[in-house]
Amino acid sequence: MNTGLDVFATLHDLVQRSVASLPGAQRGSLLVRAGRRLVYRAAVGFDGVLPGKLRVPSDGGLVSGSAPHGPAAAPEAARGPCLVSAAAWYRAHLPEVAESPGWPPEGAHVLLVPVHLFGAPGAYVALEQPDATPLQGAYRALLESIAESAGAALERRGLFDEKAQVAQELRLLEEVLNAVAESVDLLELIETVADGIRSVQTGPRWSTIDLAILDDPGSGARASSAADAMPMMRFYKAPRRPMTAYWNNVRDGVLAAGRDLRATVEFKSGTVAGAVSQEALFEEGIRRRVSGIAVAPIDPVELEPLIRRAEEAGIPVIAIDSPPVEGSRCSLYIGTDNRIAGRLAGEMMLRLLPQGGRVTAQAPSIAVPNARDRLDGFREATAGTALRVASISENRFDSALGVELALSTLRADPELEGAFGICSENGPGLGIASRTLGRAGELKLVAFDLITPTVAMLQDGVIHAAVVQREYDMGYRCVQALHDMVTRGVERALAELPASRFVDTGVDVVTIERTPFSIALSDYLAMSSAHRIANRKLGAPDRDLGLEFLVIGMAERESVAGDERAPVAEQSLAGRVISTCCSLVIDTTSSEYERFSDVAEARWNGARTMVGVPLFSRDAVFGVLLLSSERPDACSPSDLALIERVAAVAAVVLENARLLSRIKERTRELEALSRRQEALLDTIATMSSPVVPIARGVLVMPIVGALDAQRSGSFIDAMLREITEHQARVVIIDVTGMAVVDAGAANHLVQAARAAGLLGTEVVLVGIAPEAARLMVDQGLDLGSIVTRSTLELGFSYALSKTGGRVVYRSP
């Protein structure tokens, strides 16, 4: 029994054995306790009773001693196997059956066999029998033995689930903390937080995770008092993009390499077309003349001309994740050997379906080299077996279309026993379809990569295995390779790499539990984090070489986050959280919150649970993390505790981003003020040292204020410029307005006279005050051969005598 690969099949087999072991048993199920509810994990014999298949896992109703159905709603009271009325049981835990006319049969009972998990009843095998015959002898021992096996399988699964959740939580907190060191915008932050919470908390299945931030940083409520009036808030609704986690991992590797190698690295996700298309981003990189470019080509043919242009411009180009066209001018391809990865997927499917069967496959497009190679590898692994690929669909990079195609395929061919999700988004799409049709777990599903929905479906048993690329390594090694090419030369760097110019980063096969041919999800996450830490310890060069690299990833499509500004009323979830400074979990059907406008809207959209968690900066609330789920009672105390921990870390990141924004804004203000001050000083300098031509060949330059080294240079430059322009023979420097004529000022005046003398112009110094003259004598200052006169009038007379002019005095 290999529960690690297919726990659904294990539990289903145990229920089947239980039904076969009990004389007269018609049908049976296994229900597991989840909080106050029971959830169906396996069911046998209901196909002819229900209008459709019983979804597994699915809600099995409330477990409560005060419920109106007595022991049927409170099976935990049972010390051992016990009988309850079938009608009461199905009314409590399968109402769609209880409502069927003439069913259950009169006198039918359900035998409940408790399954102990960690010492207490945590699950129940429910077997329907035609009468109230008690369980006796060997039958009792056999069913208790089966229940014990089910308990062992569930305990083992629970331990691996718990270990995986702890590993995911640590990884989530690490990712959010890493953002503290970066300049994070709010959209990127909420996507990181939302993606991480969804991957850790698979039970609630959060449909929305939003962020509300107060406009005024100082308007938050103090923890000791309520706010009198609700301020304006800005709401950020990040788009749901399943591939976010994959490309976030690539980005993390890229940025880590940039830090280690002390290079500037920019990571951008490009679409097929539009303003942020891969072509537009590539063009921008060439225009900026970056040191190197790495790209994951969506359309290798369209990008090849740009790759050639980059090479001609001396910019090395590397392809990552998806290979370039044959004969490409790309220097290197770093990624996955997709044919080998496809073979591994095929081998896993053979283990899941050892008797063979019909399988469907889905890809974005078979024309994409990655998808084509994986499918070829899958077929190679299953060649010569009873397993065959019966159909292939293409979702054209549209996740919603992928779900529709999967539903259509499964409805049209109910004999399909397996499904292969060839690329990241295909596995979750097939999983949604199998869950919708009640075939979750029964349909054996192998996916690619560990994006958030894949993690959730692995834990739910909807996806059985995932072939996981090492995308972090991909990002890290592409920057490493570009750095080597630029610093050591392309040929020298490539000489140490495989002759094929292809670096295979490898794959891992991940299942929820560890098996001889796969890694447990928890172990994978732990190893991944350890590997990142090891990469960060690599030596870095002693100096910054000023290199700039551009890495272009893939985006599913260009999408814009919801970003709206609105007042927050007290009668709203966000308003209540701000005013009370406390987290709040709301049942949207409760009459207590029926006046809350946002709760009413969420209820209209199908939400049953809403959660609001405050974001604190010191002792003030400045924002709220908002979540909603279509599940009732979706947020357990442990779920809320994790969300509060994430919110605390996110608050630090947000405060860091807000602080950076304020610093940048203040820096811009200071730079503008500095520019205005410089302009003012220039104006003052011009006004304090004007040049006035007063006669042919004679200039007057008054000096007002101090003559320091900086001003002296400007003064001499202006003087020489005006001498040349006016062909002046004499410059009269009037120092009447100078504050002090000290040794420094005297030296600057001598330099000015010497500079003028080189142009054949004589300097006359006028306006020296008696106190200044006395100070100059006391300090032994020497003005050299500069001619001095006491007043401007006398200096002007001297200048005219040198230029052949004369002063004529006329009476009024």
Image (cartoon, rainbow, N blue to C red):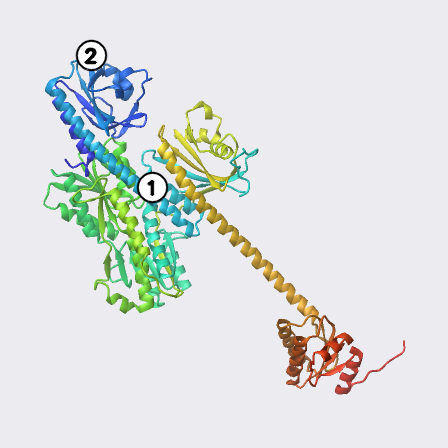
What residue type is disc 1 on? Glu
Snapshot quadrant of residue 300: bottom left
Image coordinates of residue 153 in percent, x first then y, are: 19, 33
Q: Residues within 10 Å of mark 2 (few under 14, many from 20)?
A: few
Q: Is residue 558 left or right of residue 84?
A: right
Image coordinates of residue 110 in percent, x first then y, are: 21, 18
Q: Nearer the viewer, mark 2 or mark 1?
A: 1
Q: Which comes before the other along the chain, label 2 or label 1?
A: 2
Snapshot quadrant of residue 87: top left
Residue designated by label 2 = 107
Q: Do the numbered discs 2 and 1 sit on residues whose CB atoms are within 8 Å?
A: no
Residue designated by label 1 = 169
Q: Residues within 10 Å of mark 1 (few under 14, many from 20)?
A: many
The answer to whether any part of residue 423 appears in the image is: no
- Real-space Cα distance between discs 2 and 1? 50 Å
Q: Say which residue appears at 59% left-offset and 62% top-offset.
A: 675
Image quarter where the C terminus lies is bottom right
